[in-house]
Image: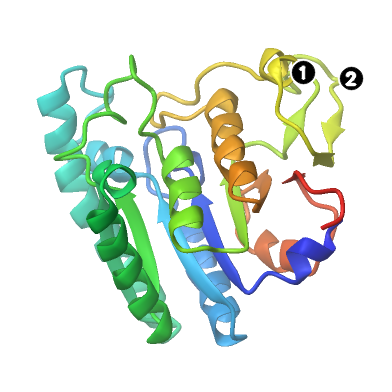
Amino acid sequence: MRNVVKRAKRIVVKVGTSSLIYQDGGINLSSIDQLAFALTDLNNRGLEVILVSSGAIGVGMKKLHLQNRPETIPEQQAVAAIGQAELINIYNQRFSIYGQTIGQVLLTRDVTEYPESRQNVSNTLEQLLRMKIIPVVNENDTVAVDELDHLTKFGDNDQLSAIVTVVTDADLLIMLSDIDGFFSSDPLIEKQAKLFHEIHQVNADLYKVAGGQGSILGTGGMHSKLRAVERIFAAKKAMILANGKNPRILFDIIKGEEIGTLFVEDLKM
């Protein structure tokens, strides 16, 4: 089954806020540096790589010395605007060390709702990939508020990464999170929790197993990841959920090692 991973030529890597920001709110420069190194090396190997990055609000909170996430939408939009500028500066700095050029792409929900917008986004990403530039994608939080409003929970970057995978016809989505994969129960609570190495179907029972929302800095949770998997399955793609504490894990994933949870619907893949 891991052959689908080894055959992948175009890959979307989604990194969550927990992989970029320490629990105390500090920016994890070591993780960002390792991520830049790994993605640059994959690009040098001839793979096409797209990064979907969370972290704008987390970085903005650090920049503004905020201890708690703002509650109102305008406040969150302002913090996201500040954080996104700071985050892309950090990415530019770290990627440039390895001689890799990146391009920022901020998306709103109309990419899925309007064919013209979808085509424009596709054209931009395709051109960047042809130029061997790594696109760094995030939702435009100053315009799109779905992600910010936790009552809707539709616009989080788990969904965005799945949308980007479909729009770009990528072969594989690698979702780096703060957990080793999908478990039978919460591994932080139950020591007997079992890691599922492969999942071929998303159903009501699987949603029951999934936990709640993510960290105070992020917006995703296991439910959100399962909804992303449903998008991936509908497009006949594959996804891996793995721990992003050390982004160099990407090298082992690409080699087809049994890391994290592989979500693939077609058993013949």
**Residue at (25% x, 47% y) in the render:** 114
In the image, residue 109 lies at what x, y percent?
28, 41
Q: Quadrant of the N terminus?
A: bottom right
Q: Is residue 189 visible?
A: yes
Mark 2 in CB contact with mark 1 (< 8 angstroms): yes
Task: Indicate the quadrant where residue 29 lies.
Answer: bottom left
**Disc 2 to disc 1, how far (Cα)?**
8 Å
Q: Name the residue type under label 1.
A: Ser
Q: Is residue 132 visible?
A: no
**Is residue 82 found left or right of 20 in the rendered image?**
left
Mark 2 secondary-structure assignment: loop
Residue 170 in the figure: left or right of residue 143: right
Q: Relative to the observer, which residue lies in front, 230 or 62? A: 230
Left or right for 76, reference 166 = left
Q: Residue at x 69, y 60 (%)?
A: 249
- For the image, the number of numbered tags is 2
Q: Secondary structure at mark 1?
A: loop
The colour scheme used to paint the residues is rainbow
Residue at 74%, 61% (x, y): give it: 253
Q: Amino acid at mark 2?
A: Gln
Q: Is residue 261 above or below residue 171?
A: above
Query: Along the line of sight, which residue is nearer the eye, 159 or 93?
Result: 159
Q: Residue at coordinates 60% horizontally, 35% vertically from top-left?
A: 230
Mark 2: few/some/many CA within 10 Å (<14, 14-19, 20+): few
Mark before the other along the chain sequence, 2 or 1: 1
Q: Which marked residue is nearer to the observer: mark 2 or mark 1?
A: 1
Q: Which mark is residue 192?
A: 2
Q: Which mark is residue 185?
A: 1
Q: Position of residue 183 (x, y in %)?
A: 77, 27
